[in-house]
């Protein structure tokens, strides 16, 4: 029997308190996971060169060919099982010694969890979970196991990956927006800032005294302090600046 889990992280029910000036909110994208060997979508050799989003990452694709969609995510789950957190993930955990660190991630992997971060919000779902196709509140922890056609929820409907596909709403966004509003320091790591609504979070950080963008090929330079470096090197530089 698969373990059923709540739709939202437990910490959202008891939000952390932070000392004045000590709330660090981090938005992470595919660039932070790339250093752990996980394929990105937009870089050369990335996933979209092997698969079209219209084949594997839309509700229409699921209706048309659920077997292919399941195969795609099963392969990603298998790859994730072999990946490990990199120094960028671990340094974010270390920053909790001096800051309250909220990690908002566009990634569906569990590397922040394995890196030890205490407060993580997944905007686009989680690869290690599955959910019902008729009741989105029925979510199950599956780890790195595959989902097969015929695997069903307790109501008898087919299980699907617990991820947000293109064209679907992002139900976690209001939580992310709230924390962006509260941030004293806001950091973007390894995100192209091209996928909305996540890319709009930077515009919500009107209280932040510092805004950083860590990326080896930044696409934005106004309104942020750019650290032009890969994720692990960039977070090391960040730590030197804010500690």
Image (spheres, grey):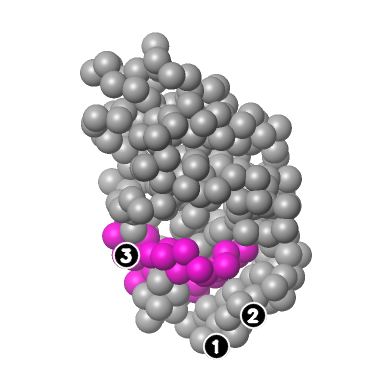
Membership of 195 in magenta stretch: yes
Which residue is painted at 65% across and 75% down in the image? 218
Q: Position of residue 95 (x, y in %)?
A: 60, 59
Q: Position of residue 198 (x, y in %)?
A: 43, 64
Which contiguous range is marked in magenta?
174-199
Task: Kindly indicate the quadrant of the structure image that contains residue 133.
Answer: top left
Determine which of the numbered discs, if any, sits on residue 178 in the image: 3
Which of the two residues, 69 or 88, is positioned nearer the viewer here?
69
Total marks in image:
3
Badge 1, how many Cα within 10 Å: few under 14, some, many 20+? Answer: few
Above or below for 57 versus 202 = above
- Label 3 or label 2, whichever comes before in sequence order: 3
Name the residue that disc number 2 marks: 226
Question: Which residue bears the numbered disc 1?
Answer: 222
Report the Cα–Cα distance between label 1 and label 3.
23 Å
Disc ID at residue 80: none
In terms of image quadrants, where is residue 31? bottom right
Q: Secondary structure at mark 1?
A: loop
């Amino acid at each position: 029997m698969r373990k059923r889990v709540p739709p939202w992280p437990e910490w959202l029910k008891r939000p952390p308190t932070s000392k004045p000036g000590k709330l660090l909110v981090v938005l992470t994208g595919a660039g932070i996971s790339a250093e752990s060997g996980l394929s990105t979508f937009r870089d050369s050799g990335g996933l979209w060169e092997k698969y079209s989003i219209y084949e594997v990452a839309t509700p229409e694709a699921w209706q048309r060919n659920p077997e292919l969609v399941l195969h795609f995510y099963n392969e990603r789950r298998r790859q994730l099982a072999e990946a490990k957190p990199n120094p960028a993930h671990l340094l974010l955990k270390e920053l909790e010694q001096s800051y309250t660190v909220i990690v908002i991630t566009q990634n569906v992997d569990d590397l922040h969890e394995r890196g030890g971060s205490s407060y993580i919000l997944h905007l686009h779902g989680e690869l290690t979970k599955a959910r019902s196709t008729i009741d989105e509140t029925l979510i199950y922890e599956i780890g790195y196991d595959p989902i097969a056609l015929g695997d069903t929820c307790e109501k008898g409907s087919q299980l699907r990956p617990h991820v947000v596909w293109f064209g679907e709403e992002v139900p976690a966004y209001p939580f992310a927006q709230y924390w962006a509003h509260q941030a004293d320091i806001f950091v973007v790591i390894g995100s192209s800032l091209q996928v909305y609504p996540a890319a709009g979070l930077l515009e919500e950080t009107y209280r932040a005294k510092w805004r950083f963008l860590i990326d080896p090929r930044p696409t934005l330079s106004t309104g942020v302090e750019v650290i032009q470096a890969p994720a692990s090197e960039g977070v090391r530089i960040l730590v030197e600046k804010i500690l």
